[in-house]
Every structure is written in structure tokens, then in C-alpha cells.
Amino acid sequence: MIEAAKIWNEPNNKSHWDPELDPDWSLYAAMTRTACDAIQAENARLPRVLGGMSPIDPGFVLNLKSKGVLDKVDVLAVHGFPLDWNHWQINDWPAKIDEISAVSDGKPVWVTEVGVSTFGAEEVQEFGLRRSAELLIGKAPRLHWYSLFDLPRAWPATTRHKEAEGSSYYRHFYMGLVREDGTPKLAYRHFRDFAPHLGICQWFHFEDHRLDDAVRHLRTLGVRHLRTGLSWADSFRPGADAWFDRMMAALDEFDVTVTFCFTPEHLGPGRHHTSPPHRSEDFAEFCARMIRRYCPG
């Protein structure tokens, strides 16, 4: 079942929201306010989550607070990858959550992505899983490990600058507990020690062939909480509703935080799926339709 609705993914990350088109996040703030109202109108009990911050930045929260966004959301979410992309150490995790809690107006802070790649060695992920769990279980009410599967080599990572990012780009392909060939990595055997306190974040591509295997692995690992996404851009593909129905039915046994994101080219500037939409109402209508279809009030 859907336990929360999340508005966008990493909106303060230039790989996921175009800073040239929205330098002060005014467009994101307006879109979030409108989407939150639409979600609440469909299901007033469903928590609305502010898209996971990456980087973790109290200034970003204060900016959105000044634009009325904190009046509309119920939860703030953060993403952190100190062993791969961030400029802080893994032991700083509690302090990072405290920084956001201090400006959250008392709203809970969830960690909707925490992970470690096997880019250099699988033993690094093995250590990172254990240490992340030690630091975060009991510190944040919801935790999602990123991710279950490695990204297939033939698929592009969802980031704007791709190979120009150097090794940072290629780390995207090594974040899973399961290799592309379906075999588990070293950290896989430890994950059940931390479930169900530690959930999983796994994005599924349109008509993703890994869906049934994902459900099997999630059961094996003892996962209760799952985060995934419903792509606004994908919703315009032929057969989109059938795919969404299949995916959500397969995941119904888990408590799902569903993320709404990705702008269709014809409803934005067309530069990239990270572009702000021309009209906040268009995105809000998509969010409302998904809640009405999968989690009516």
C-alpha cells in the first residue's frame, strides 16, 4: 500500500532540477504547494514528503519555508552518500539529520536514500551498510537503502551531465545489493540483520523486467518499507496505466513511499526531464490521478 507521497527527487541537486530555469526554487516551491493541495484533496491522511534533499542543506529548507512550502508538507526527506558523492564523513550522519530537524518546524526527517557503491570494492559497501544502520536506526523514523539492484550497463543513469561527471557518473551503476547478473553482493547477506528498520529504495524503469525478481528479493531480505517512483513523463507512453497497475499491484504488500517526478518534454521547456513544468497544475493533476487510482482517501 502507499504510505506516503513524495514530491520530486533531489530538487536541490542540479542533476534532478534545472537551476538555470529555476535558480531560487520559486517554480519548485509553487509546484510543490499545488501538488500537496491536490494530494490532500484526494487523501487527507496521506503524508506528503518534501523531495529528498541532496545535498543536505538547511538553507534550502529555510528558502522553501519562506515560500510557504513547509506549511504544505508533513515530512522532510534527505539523501546522503558520504562514501561516494558527499563531502562529509559517514559518522556525520546524526549531525546532518539534526541540522534539518533544527529548521523543520517539528516535522519528522526521513532518510529516503542512503547507500554505498561497490565501485572500488564490495567490502566498502559491506562496511557502509553496517555503519549506516548503526548510525541511523532510531535516529530517523524511515530509512531507505539505495538500492536493491545495480543499474544495467546498457541503461543511462538519471543525471543531466552523464559521462561528463567522470567517476561520479559511473558509481550510479554499482549502488545495488544485487549485481546486474542477479547474483548477490557481500552486503546482501547482512541486510536482513537490519530489516525491517531499514527499507529499500528501488527505482523501476518503464516495463522493468526486474520487477518480479525485486519482489522476491525484498521478501527474502525482510523489507517492509519500499520507496519507488511513478514517472510523470512515463505516464504519456502507450500502455502506461497498465504498467503502473502491474507495478503497484506487485508492490502492494509493502509500505510504499511513492515519488512523483520527471517532466514530460511537451509540458516543459523540453530540455530535459529535470526542467520545471510550464504549469504547476499539470503536475498536480498527475499526482491527484495517481492517488485517486492507487490510494484513494
Image (cartoon, rainbow, N blue to C red):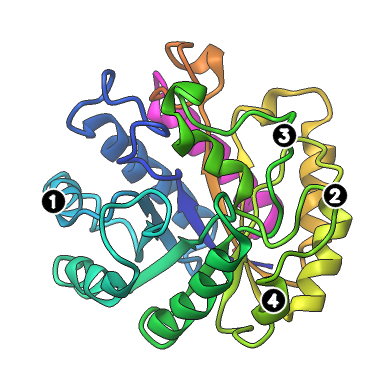
Instruction: Please tell me which of labels 4 and 1 falls first in the chain.
Output: 1
Instruction: Please tell me which of labels 1 and 2 falls first in the chain.
Output: 1
Is 264 one of the magenta-colored residues? no
Give the class, few, some or many, for how many residues have Cα within 10 Å of label 2's Cα (few <14, many ≥20).
few
Residue toward you, 158 or 121: 121
Question: How many angstroms separate mark 4 from mark 1 (CA)?
Answer: 33 Å
- Pinpoint residue 33: horizontal percent, then vertical percent: 32, 45
Point out the image quarter for the C terminus: bottom right
- Pinpoint residue 174: horizontal percent, then vertical percent: 62, 49
For label 3, the residue is 153
For label 1, the residue is 59
| Residue type beneath disc 3 | Arg
**Would residue 189 appear left or right of 37 to someone viewing this image?**
right
Instruction: Please tell me which of labels 3 and 2 falls first in the chain.
Output: 3
| Residue type beneath disc 2 | Asp
For label 4, the residue is 223
